[in-house]
Image (cartoon, rainbow, N blue to C red):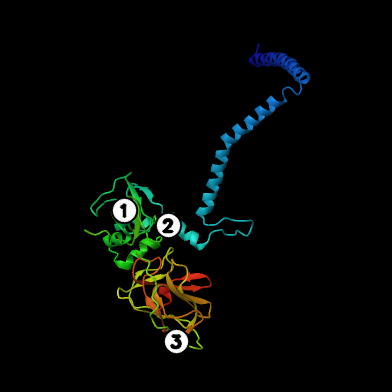
Amino acid sequence: MSISRELLIFAQSLRAYVRFRGYRLFTHFEVAKSALVDALYKKRGRYVRPFLHVGTIGLIFSTIIIGPKVLSYAGEEGEVAAEFGVLESGASGTSFYTQQAEEVRQFRGGEILIHSVAEGETLSTIAERYGLQVDTLLWENDLTEKSKLKPGQELRILPVDGVRHKVARGETIFSIGKKYGLEGSEAQVLVDYPFNDFLNDETFELATGQFLVVPNGVRVASTGQRPTTSARLTPDAGSVTAFGSFVWPAAGRITQGYSFYHKAIDIANGSGGPILAADSGVVTQAGWLDGFGYGNRVMIDHGNGTQTLYAHLSVAQVQPGQRVNRGDVIGQMGSTGRSTGTHLHFEIRQGGVLLNPSSSLR
């Protein structure tokens, strides 16, 4: 008998066996099913509640098991959208990210990252990757310029250049600022950095053991002043027209520049001095309006969509509604409100947007 003939007989026998066994199994299944249906039919209603309970438990169990995976997937989708800085709605691709949110994202909400050193990386390449100075890496990780990195070594990465400080008993923002090269009103940067916390936002009270980031700090071997009323008011200037350009409003040195968390410049002068209107306009605010924040301030509307604000004055020498010429004295430099020392907080606003004063002053 040939091999093909044997294979044919084997196939026919296998087919007959499967049909026979399958028929018997199907028959037994039908008998069991019929018996179960008959029993349930006879006692219909008795098993409704158990079935509902079992179904509910099964639904809850499925939600617990599958739910986290669904949420995790949705979270990953959101992170991808955030990485590209836009969430699209329909075909228009509407952005839900404001410039401020983008800037906060840029500085990671104040988060300190942990970087694992890869083969061939150096302090300079790591610093460049995160947009920091090498000194910032050295200070935060207790390294020196002679330190050699090893693959797998972990480094703490600050969100901004500067120093992170652990507060000791009795320390204040002034003593901490001085420790890292910030004298007097320069300590204002500790207050304005949005990710530093205080026990009291008005007195800047610190908790022993907490950490503060000192932006632009360098590691080296009370503010509730109320305005006085004795200063003479500047006379009304009559009809005025804005020049469209700005002069320096005070004499001194810039102790804090324009940044995403400080949309102004601070000009400090230990001896105080007069504050001048940067351009002609009408005074819309003058005095200590809320008891904190800007303190004693003056705001001028220049009539061309632009306003300037002068904050932390010791005294305002103008009144709301008064017209001033560019260069008129509007107050005296002070340290009222949320301030750490004698200085001027100067803002330029246009259409609700705070511009960089350094680009507009001459």
Between marks 3 and 1 in the image, the one whose residue lies nearer the viewer: 3
Q: Write down the quadrant of residue 64 in the picture.
A: top right
Give the left or right position of residue 201, taking residue 8 as reference: left
Which residue is outermost to the bottom?
A: 238
Can residue 362 be spotted in the picture? Answer: no
Q: How far apart are marks 2 and 1 (CA)?
A: 22 Å
User: What residue would you read off at disc 3?
Assistant: 235
In the image, is residue 272 above or below residue 51? below
* Circle 2: element type: loop
- Which numbered marker is on residue 107? 2
Labels 3 and 1: the sequence-earlier one: 1
Q: Distance between the residues labelled 3 and 2?
A: 46 Å
Alpha-carbon neighbours of circle 2 within 10 Å: few (<14), some, or many (≥20)?
A: some
User: What residue would you read off at disc 1?
Assistant: 167
The picture places residue 352, in percent across and down from the top left corner, at 52, 70
Q: Which of 144 and 98 is in front in this view?
A: 98
Do the residues under discs 3 and 1 have CB atoms within 8 angstroms?
A: no
Q: Nearer the viewer, residue 150 or 275?
A: 275
In the image, is residue 202 above or below residue 309? above
In the image, is residue 351 above or below residue 176? below
Residue at x 26%, y 49% (from the top left corner)? 148
Which residue is outermost to the top?
A: 1
Disc 2 residue type (three-letter): Phe
* Circle 1: element type: loop
Residue at x 53%, y 72% (from the top left corner)? 351
Q: Nearer the viewer, residue 18 or 31?
A: 31
